[in-house]
Image (cartoon, rainbow, N blue to C red):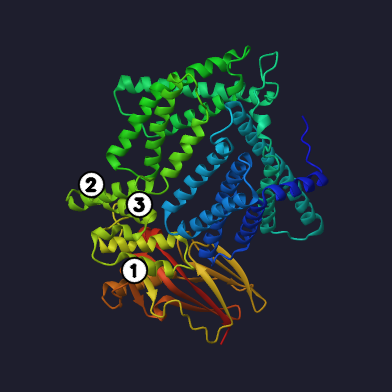
Amino acid sequence: MKLKLPSLHALWLSFLRVIARFPLQVIVALAGTIAWCCVVDMPYTQVHKEEQLIEFMAVCNLALTLLLAADLYAEVNQFGKIKQWGLRLLMVLICTGLYFLLKPYFYLADMYRLGLLAVAFYLLVAFAPFIGRGNLNGFWQYNKSLFLRILTSGLYAAVLFAGLAIALGAIDGLFNVKIGWQTYMRLFAVVSAGFMTIFFLAGVPDDFDVLNKEESGESGESERYPKGLKIFTQYVLIPLMTIYLVILLVYEVKIVLSWQLPKGLVSTLILGYAVFGILSLLLVYPIKEKEGNGWIKLFSRFFYVMMIPLVVLLLLAVWKRVGVYGITESRYILVVLALWLTIITFYFLISKKQNIKIIPVSLCILALLATYGPQSAFSVSRYSQVARLKKLMASKKDKDIKERGPVVNYLVDRHGLAVLQPFTKRDLRQIENKIEKDADSLSRYSVISIKTDTANTLLNIKYDPHSSFIDSRRFEAETGTLVPVNGYDYVVAIESYVDKQSFKAGGINVTVEKTNQYGNLKLKVGNAAPVEYDVRKLAKDAVALYKAGKLKGKKEDVGVSYVPSEGLSITRQLGGLDIKLVITSLNTTLNAADEEELNKWLNYNGYLLVGSKR
C-alpha cells in the first residue's frame, strides 16, 4: 500500500469545508500554532512569559476538543445557528476561565488539572454525538473513524515535516544559508498544530445516520471493518496482552507463595495491561462473535475473567502505598482507576447487554470529578498530606523528623505555600503573592525553591532531597533588581541553569559558560585568554557575613538576607572590555565549607554589564 499525500487542490477544498463546519477550531489551531512559534523565539530571560504561552497552548488543546464535542452534539441534535453559537460561546468562556484560573507555572497541581481535563474532553468527543441517541454499532463506527483519522493525520504530518525538513537541510548545505534549529521547530509547530489538526477535522464523520445503520454481509462480518485493524489487533495487540497476562499471573503466584505484599511497579503494569486489553476489545467489538475469529472470541470471553486476580493484586498494591505514605494526586488516580476497573470487570462479566459506551462515559465523569471539588484528587491529597504533616510535626522520632521535609516540599510544589497556614501565624498568602510577583525572570525551579526555603525556615525544618538535612539561605542585593549601569554599554541577563551563551559587544565576540555543572563562570572575549568569575567565593563570603550577623533582613521576607551590592559583584577587564558580573539573587547552603554540598545548592540570577575598558 503506497502512501499518497493529498493534492494541494484537495487540501484547499478540505480546508474550506473545515472552516465552514468548525470555524472556532481553526482559529484555536492557528492561535496555538502562533503561540508555539513564539515559544521557540522566546529569550531564556523571559521564563515566565514562556510558561504563560505554554499554558495558553495547553488551553488551546482543551478548547479544540471541547468545541469539537459541542459542535458534534449540536449537529446531531440539529441546533439552529443561534443555539449552536450560544453553545460555542459557552465553551470559549469555560476555556478562557481555565486559562486565568490555572497557574501551572507556580503549582504542580494545576499541571495535573490540565492533564485530567484533556483526558475528560478527549473522551467527551468520543461519545458527545451519541448522548441519548444512536446505537452501539454507530458509536463504534464513529470512534473507529476518529481513531483511523488520527493515525492517518499523524502519518501525513510526519511525512510532510520530514520532506520539508530535508528540503531545508538541502538548502542549508548547498547554499550555506545557515538555517537555525528555530526554523525547524517552527516548521514542526505549523505541521503538527496547524496542518495535522485541520487535516484531522476534515475527516470527522458528519453523517451519523449512516453510521447508525447495522451492517452485516453474507460472510457474517462487517464489510466496512478494516482488515489492517483486524490483523493489528489479532496478531500484534492481543498476543502482547497475553504475554503480559502470563507474567502478571506468575508474579501473583510468587506473591502468594512468598506471602509478601506486591511492589508498587505491579500497579502500573496491571493498569497498562487493562488499558490495552480494553482497547483491543473495543477495536474488535463488531467481529468478536463472528465465525472465523476464534482467537479474538476466546480473548474476548476470558479477558475479564483473568482480570479478577489482577484486580485483587492491584488493590493490594494500592493499599500498601496509601496505607504507609497517605494519598497524593497520583495515588488518588491509581485508587480511582483500581475501583473503576473492578466495577467495569464485574459489569462485563455479569451484564448481557455489555454497552461499550459506558467505558468512555464513566472515565470522562471520573476525570471531571477528580479535577475540582472536595472529592477531587487535589482536595483529598492536600487534606491527607497536611494531616500526615501534623502527625510528623508532633512526633519526636528521628524517622518522622526526616520525613517532614519531603512532605513540605510536596505540599509547596503542588499546592503552594499558603497550604501550610495551619502551621504558622505568618500570613503565607501575602508572602507567596510577593514571591510570585517578583518571579517574572525566574525559572519555575527557582520559584519553588524560594517557597520551599521559606516554608522550611518558618517551620524550622532542615531538608535536603539528596541527604538527610540541608540548611539553605537566599541572598539578595540591597538594591534588588535595580542595577546601576553608568559607564557600561550593554546589559546581559545571566542565570545559573544556562550552561553557555554568546553575544557581540561593540563588534567583539563574547562567550559566557559555566566552568562546571554548578556555578562559576568563564568569559572569553575575542582572542584574549578566558577569565573566570568565582561565584562560589561570593556565596561563601555571603554565608560568612550572615553567620557573623552582619546582614540585614526584612520581616516580610522570611529566609532572605540582603547583601551590599559590592558583595555580590565581580569586575574583570579583558579583550578591551570592562565586564562586571552583578548578582541580584543567590541561593546557597549555609554549610558552604562543604564543597560538595555547595556544588549541589548554588543557583543565582544576575546581569553582565559590558563596556569599554576605562
Q: Nearer the viewer, residue 256 or 339?
A: 339
10 Å crowding of disc 2: few (<14), some (14-19), many (20+): few
- Residue at 77% in and 56% down: 172
Specify which label sits upstream in the sequence, 2 or 1.
2
- Residue at 47% in and 36% down: 363
Closer to us: mark 3 or mark 1? 1
Q: Kindly tell me whether residue 277 is visible in this rendering.
A: yes
Closer to us: mark 2 or mark 3? 3
Mark drawn on residue 399? 2
Tell me residue 312's x, y (percent). Answer: 36, 25
The residue at which mark 3 appears reads as 410
Instruction: Work out whether 233 lies above or below 11.
Output: above
For marks 2 and 3, give the CA distance. 17 Å
| Residue 400 as seen in the image, left or right of residue 166 | left
Tell me residue 400's x, y (percent). Answer: 22, 48
Q: Nearer the viewer, residue 343 or 561?
A: 343
Closer to us: mark 2 or mark 1? 1
10 Å crowding of disc 3: few (<14), some (14-19), many (20+): some
Give yes or no for contact between labels 2 and 3 (Cβ–Cβ under 8 Å): no
For marks 2 and 1, give the CA distance. 32 Å
Instruction: Work out whether 373 lies above or below 247.
Output: below
Mark drawn on residue 430? 1
Write down the quadrant of residue 474 in the picture: bottom left
Write down the quadrant of residue 611 in the picture: bottom right
Give yes or no for contact between labels 3 and 1 (Cβ–Cβ under 8 Å): no
For marks 3 and 1, give the CA distance. 20 Å
